[in-house]
Image: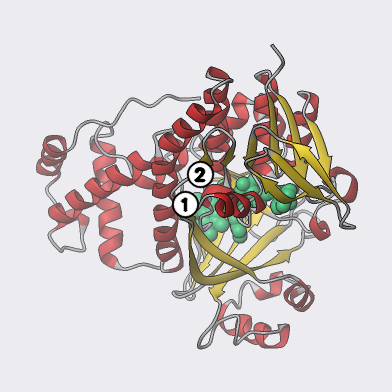
Amino acid sequence: MARQTITLIGGGLVGALLAQLLAKRGFAVDVFEKRPDPRRSGFVGGRSINLALAERGLQALRTAGLENDVMERAVMMRGRMVHPREGSSGLQRYGVDDSEVIWSVSRGGLNMLLLDAAEAAGVTMHFGQGLAAADIDARRITLADDSGVQRDWDAPVLIGADGAGSALRAAMDDYSPLGIRVESLGHSYKELEIPPGHGANRFAIEPHALHIWPRGGYMCIALPNTEGSFTVTLFLPAHGPHPSFDTLPDAAAASAFFRSDFPDLLPLIPDFAEDYDSHPVGTLSTLYLDRWHIDGRALLIGDAAHAIVPFHGQGMNCGFEDTVVLANLLAESPNDTADAFAEFQRIRKPNADAIAAMALENYIEMRDSVADPYYLAKRELGARLAERAPQHFMARYRMVTFTHLPYAYAFERGRAQDVLLEQLLRGSTNAGDVPMDAAVAALQATLPPLPPLRHG
Ligand code: FAD
Ligand code: E0Q
């Protein structure tokens, strides 16, 4: 029998990884990517933009045989370095020790590595070819290059990994409504750069951390790059009263704002004015769909199906987890894509919804993380319970970041644990007020043990 052919739209992070996994499982895979080949043209303006890679994404890269290649170019982040408005900064560890850390990776570098791996597995890449139209009935698509030249392509099975602004999603929705809902966060972002230092100290600030400057309604973060630079991201309301991107239209206004609100950060960004005026403002939204597929003909994956806000650092990780689930389902029933697609949505949609909700919650937590005493008491009591009864209590952040437990499980379990913490604290802002023997007994009586964790 002829090899089953799959046409993928989008050769970004998720598309390139999925293409490799499918090719390794015997599918004939063509990928159409709107942009030119980044290995030839260089990545978007040559800027280095990075992302946090955690266990879920790593697990998918392991499945693809790429863990070591990626880790060679990753910078370890042990925790969150919080820079308060007043007082000194401190590291909040992400996990118990250096076995529970996350990794800063270059988006462009990772994408190029994934494209190399896809091609090595036999995938055919078509760069500079964007999806312009899709005829779902005829199972044909139209592609357009930069100069507007169009061509048609037979695509019996279509998968859209073309990101938050997915063109395939729009074409599918025209054919048969998907129930699309876009919820704008109302906050936007802009990237700035801390260049490498000279001499002994290549990194201007602690390299092995994710830096956060929380300021209540807004914040800056910085992630390290291998060369010693950091990519800074400012998150700020898009509109409205000061400070917002409306009230900070240019570098002159923004540098005065940084002088007053981020006085320790501004001197680390020597090209502030140029960065601020030349880098775009990005918008942030959560995307929900009722349906991710049209029978066995077309399916959406990654951000195209479920874009989320970035405050848990899980968008790519979730999309990578998607690719392994889908590749396994398609390999199990290569001739019943309708069944594989339906099963993919059944398994992944509750998890996508859960991480979307947790990512939104994390923004509040991050930007206010100078924190209210009640929240800190809950966290402290949680840490004590996890120490005393690790089979029964695990912080939600750890479940999301360092395990493969389904996101929906982490969300639900986190909620149940939170209810218990509030019952035990009874309004107190001091975890020391709670008698621990009784607390552990209550925990073990109320919640079933956590599922066993698979490692590595
Ligand atoms: P994309 O990476 O957007 O790739 C889509 C690809 O499709 C692109 O190559 C695009 O050129 C191509 N394309 C688009 N339209 C067409 C078309 N019509 N035809 C053909 N090709 C097309 N996630 C994390 O896990 N950790 C983080 O720390 C993190 N930080 C983030 C910070 C910010 C500010 C933002 C905005 C996101 C962050 N994310 C993070 C989320 C992460 O960027 C996304 O989840 C991830 O890039 C999704 O991958 P994707 O392949 O689905 O989409
Ligand atoms: C992580 C790692 C963009 C971004 C990426 C992230 C995280 C944050 C805040 C942001 C969450 C955290 N976090 O530190 O709790 O763990 O990826 Cl803003």
Up-down relation of residue 278 to residue 205 (above or below):
below
Residue found 11% across the figure and 36% down from its top: 445
Applied colour scheme: secondary structure
- The residue at the point 62 percent across, 65 percent down is 233
Residue type at tag 2: Trp
Residue 93 position, x and y percent, is 46, 48
Left or right of 288: which side holds 107? Answer: right
Residue labelled 1 has its Cβ within 8 Å of some atom of ligand 1: no
Is residue 391 positioned above or below 436 on the image?
above
**The N terminus: image quadrant:** top right
Q: SS class of the residue under badge 1?
A: loop
In the rendered image, the vertical position of residue 246 relative to residue 317, given as above or below = below
Residue at label 1? 289
Q: Is residue 282 left or right of residue 177?
A: right
Q: Is residue 294 visible?
A: yes
- Report crowding for label 1: few under 14, some 14 to 19, many 20 or more residues within 10 A (C-alpha): some
Of residues 271 and 164, the one drawn nearer to the viewer in this rendering: 164
Q: Which residue is mark 2?
A: 292
232 and 138: which one is in front? Answer: 138
The amino acid on which the numbered mark 1 sits, given as a three-letter code, is Leu
Rounded to the nearest whole Å, what is the CA distance between mark 1 and mark 2?
A: 7 Å
Determine whether the residue tagged by mark 2 lies in a helix, strand or loop.
Answer: loop
- In the foreground, 295 or 314: 295
Residue 185 location in percent, x, y? 49, 68
Left/right of residue 422 with respect to residue 265 in the rendered view: left
Residue 200 point in image, percent of width and height: 77, 53
